[in-house]
Image (cartoon, coloured by chain):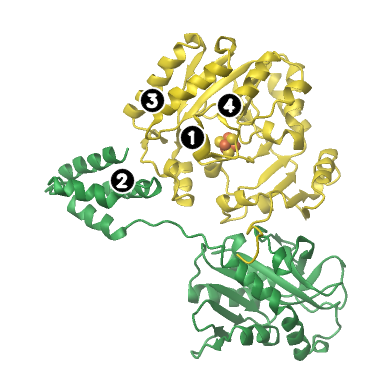
Chain colours: A yellow, B green
Amino acid sequence: MQSGKSLFNYPFSHIYVEDSVRDMELTRSILARFSKSVVIPINHYKDVFNRSRQSFGLQKSSQALILAKNTGESIFPGAPVCQDFGYDHFYYASSIRNCIFDCEYCFLKGMYGSGNIVVFVNLEDTFAELEALLAKHPVYLCVSYDTDLIALESLTGFTARWAEFTKNHEDLTIEIRTKSFRKDIYDRIEPCDRVIFAYTISPDEIIEKHEKRTAALTERLEAAAYAMKKGFPVRLCFDPVIYCENWKDSYLSMFDQVQKHIDTHQLKDVSIGSFRIPADYIKKLRKDFPDSPICQFPYENRNGVFQYSAALQAEMEDTLVTKLQSLVPKEKIYRIDVDE
Amino acid sequence: MFYFVCALYAEAKPLISALSLRKDAFSCPYDTYFSEDSSVVLTISGMGPIAGAAASSYLLTRFGFRSEKDFLINFGSCAGKDPGLYLINKITDNASGRTFYPDMLYDLSDCGLPSSSEKALVTVPRVVSSLEDPESLYEMEASGIFQAASHVLPPHRMLFLKYVSDAGVENAKAVTAEYLSSCSEKYLPAVLSVLKKLEEACEEKPSIDEELLLSTSYALHLSETLRFELRQLFMYANASGKNMEKILNDLDADGKLDVSSKREGKVVLDAIRQKLI
Ligand code: SF4
């Protein structure tokens, strides 16, 4: 290296802005926060986000931000590999694509060709789309599906806006999933029993090795406990359960931490599911991340979904469920079964 | 390896001499220059987007491009408001209106290219006499080079370095070869320091022992599908720091690799999997 300078530009050193959103309030407020960044005007976000042969991995080292208008659909039916928690009309909303965290196993690496982040600044259009759907039936919506919304809250304010919108639409229930440590959001929004904050919980060993830039286990649990204290419904997601050589010890000591920080009987519910990924996503992940043990694990392909062998999966999940049953009433434990 | 495309010999001349490049003795459609260790190849494309595209295709197909190690750099002059060397973050093809975006991943500020040196560029079919947009740069090859190269190159492996030679001229001949060379010479230290910095940007990917994989597949009488499974086990062993050679040696020492059918081979494959997980 020639100097102490990093090889890569700092995150959001480059912000691509669609001409159509240049004058929108949110665009202006985001740009004001990054006055040193290079702003590159673009016609359409796909001109940048959908370029061929991008390196998702390298772009994660120097993530660019793309501010755009979503002119197509932004609410989609939930994927079969995701838990629907018993709701009939399960959807996800895509108001931000990609995430500032960098989990080794993230399905977004298989879903998108780019590691850059797109923020669709016209959230009000998503709300309008959702209102049309709500006119037909109640909706259960994951709003932090292809990003971590809370991690980007200071940039977008979307979590607060979703919470507000949900409060005013009684047929809507939303889940906001996160691996963030941030608690300040709970001081700024009012609790609502249909705004569920869902914390992905993993052992510290998995977090350190495979969930880069995310909050440590105790930080996540402290944030979850704070949300509960403030009256928000909280879900813990032991999902994905990741195999490692000493998985039993790692996961069981993780439960000790959970018990230490959380009054588990106050949880809305919990979910548990081993790592699984659609076949076409794992193909891309394996090609792009040859040195990732999670991507290269010899999974079984069952019905187009790559999963641990049925025996390993059952052993891991049964162990965890047994433990969970001592902490949470049985009916609050949702187990994912993609083979069904 | 660095692949340079320059429109004119006059632009390339200082690079050719600083890097001691030698002219390719074979008859080539384009004048091409090499460094002794083949770490740099430079081609003179001629002027215009089609010339730029054709020369880039020639360069990349003739010499083969390793997308995890190599860079394509388009270096040359352009028209612009303020003199200086610029790193291009957006290329607009004036004829088609299409835009192209090289990835701006690398921090080249210590090479004399801070973020303030980034600019948008417009590729035009002929020399411009004035600047339609004074904030943009104007030249004649970049969009062609980007389009041709992007069939094989990722956008973070292309760099467009342009220096301002004029603010638009009526006649291309008004900018002399000597003047262009002197401009190139001026920005040579920055270009050389970019090369030095980007040497770090080599994405070495781990590879598996293909010979061992092949010999094991044969020894175990594996079908194509099972060979694929064995390859995945090799990949996993590599990624998780497990020694596949030792696992196979241990199985061999126990006489377990001595199989005579595909069915027996599959049993061994399962044994390898169990040892890995
Ligand atoms: S937090 Fe979720 S969305 Fe973000 S990188 Fe990790 S798995 Fe992907």
Q: Nearer the viewer, residue A59 or A89?
A: A59
Q: CA distance from mark 4 to mark 1?
A: 13 Å
Q: Residue under circle 4?
A: A218
- Residue receiving disc 1: A206
**Where residue B118 appears, x then y in whole percent?**
76, 63
| Co-location on one chain, circles 4 and 1 | yes
Q: Chain of mark 3?
A: A
* Helix, strand or loop under label 4: helix
Chain of the residue under label 1 = A
Q: Separation of disc 4 and disc 2 at Cα? A: 39 Å
Q: Residue at x 77, y 49 (%)?
A: A17
The residue type indicated by label 1 comes to: Ile
- Any part of residue A251 in sight: yes
Dot 4 amino acid type:
Thr
Quarter containing the C terminus of chain A: top left
Q: Nearer the viewer, residue A327 or B59?
A: A327
Give the residue drawn at x 57%, y 73%. Answer: B2
Percent of width and height locating residue A54:
58, 55
**Which of the chains bears the disc numbered 4?**
A
Give the number of the mark in front: 1 or 2: 1
Q: Residues within 10 Å of mark 3 (few under 14, many from 20)?
A: some
Residue A175 spot, x, y in % from top left: 63, 23
Instruction: Give the residue pinned by disc 3.
Output: A316
The residue that disc 2 covers is: B229
Q: Earlier in the sequence, mark 3 or mark 4?
A: 4
**A155 relative position to B40: left or right:** right
Whether tag 1 and tag 2 are in contact, CB under 8 A, the answer is no
